[in-house]
Amino acid sequence: MADLEQARGLLWSRFGFPDFLPGQGEAVAAALDGEDLFVLRPTGGGKSLVYQLPALLRPGLTLVVSPLVALMRDQAQKLDRIGIAAAALHAELPGDEWRRIREGLGRRRLKLLYLAPERLADSETLALLREGDVRTIAVDEAHCVSQWGHDFRPDYRRIAAAAEFFGFPQIIATTATAAPRSRADIIDNLFSRPPRLFVGSFGRSTIALSAAPRRGDGMAQVVELVAARRGRAGIVYCGSRAAADRLAAALGEAGLPAAAYHAGLPTDLRAARQDEFLTRTDMTIAATIAFGLGIDKPDVRFVIHLDPPDHLETLYQETGRAGRDGRPAEAITLYSPRAMAELRAARFELAAIDPMAAERAGALPRYCDTEACREQVLLGALGETAASCGRCDNCRRGAGGLRRAARVIRHATIDAMALARHGLRGGLSGFAARPFPESDREPPAPAAGDEVGARPALTVAQARRLRRLRAARLAIARKAGVAPVQVVSEDSLIRMAESPPSSLAELVETYGDASGLLSRHGLSLVENAIL
């Protein structure tokens, strides 16, 4: 096909790639033919070229819906540097750039325009975009469309209405992560016509996966891990801004180059730290989920999760920021056995209400606890069957019968205590309660009002507050269709009972809000905390 040969020529002359990756050429050919596409390829799999190359070869404008201003800017600037008429439309635009975009749309010179989904609800923006002759809408990070995916953004649901406004142009959706249920939800809510599905393997041969119980707050553990990888670039994901700040300080005190990155920092400081990280080969970024999406740094040698994300799909995406240069890299997950017990117990509680939510609640504990190949478990959650990877911690050390038996007993004990707190029974008979192993340094989850690990016993008032907080958390979880621990962890809830937040802003700042649930529903927690 002549158009595909032209695309191959642009691939080399503009982007510097000698040929398409496996499966990439077929997707570009389908896009050139005007088909609606849903492209699932792992991080670094060349998804953006599937809509960028056709945009250069055909008339009209391609709108690229993107979730982050930093990501829009980065992509538009890269295209502009290689002579492609591209721009990013966002609220922080200087006046001269805004005028350039209006002129480019009016004269139909722009080929790609990046914008946030919120823009598609603005009538003035829609009228302006209509002047640009919209032929294609490309939806980057399309998992944000699905309420069953990680990083769900309600504004992404507006894209279908915008497509109708523009006369149903071609839709090209791309993402690195979407489990089968999420894929179906994306198709139902985004496409007016059945799309052609391109699914690449989610296996990543460069990344060695591992997981381990977190010791205490995990700070010292992460410092040890980073020190053992001194001189390499890495990302450590933290569950809150405060944790990112504390960890960056601890790494600095240990003589390790590090900086914090989160949405609470001034814009210019965030940009400076991101630029420094991109240019150095020995720096660690302690970050919240605000960092990493679309960051083009190929030589990240390790990704560590001090706090694992809510969903296994998010873990997959974030670990994929390591090893993009094709060289060996590591992805290490530290987890709280207590939090995993909460998730397993929530799975039982959700099973009768929402089986899909129950399945998602159980996915992360399965990954952390498994004695099998860790990559098999991860890919299985994404709907892919794979052979043992030979790289993960379990594959490297093999499965020991005694070790497996000890873990089965340990997890059964944790489950039994977590289930007891939820008022549930069943499935765990035959296991005697045992002390939690000292090496894990995490006590089993307590019953309401009991002493929590090494903490002093709660006062009567604090125990009552904790019961109110648990009830409020459960109400939020049921409303959102998620496990209670995905709203806020049990450990954080106990901290709230001991030291109540005085406002919603303080709640979000202190405990983080990766899922967005606290910002939307957390006022009830604050109210119950200060009663």
Image: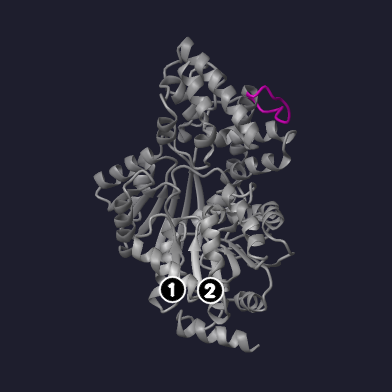
* Residue occupying image coordinates x 40% and y 35%: 509
Q: Going 67% across and 28% down the picture, which residue do you hit?
A: 431
- Give the SS element for disc 2: helix
Label disc, if present, on residue 160 of the rendered structure: none
Which residue is tagged 2?
A: 52
Task: Say if 146 sits above or below 488 in the image.
Answer: below
Mark 1 nearby-residue class (10 Å; few <14, some 14–19, many ≥20): some
Q: Position of residue 92 (x, y in %)?
A: 38, 55
- Please check the rendered image and state whether residue 148 is part of the magenta-colored stretch, yes or no: no
The stretch of residues the image draws in magenta is 422-432
For residue 199, what is the image quadrant? bottom right
Quarter occupied by the N terminus: bottom right
Q: Nearer the viewer, residue 160 or 412?
A: 160
Residue 424 among magenta residues: yes
Q: CA distance from mark 2 to mark 1?
A: 9 Å
In the rendered structure, which amino acid carries the disc numbered 2? Gln
Identify residue for label 1.
Answer: 79
Which of the two residues, 387 or 194, is positioned nearer the viewer here? 194
Q: Is residue 373 visible?
A: no
Main SS of residues in magenta: loop
Circles 2 and 1, Cβ within 8 Å, touching? The answer is yes
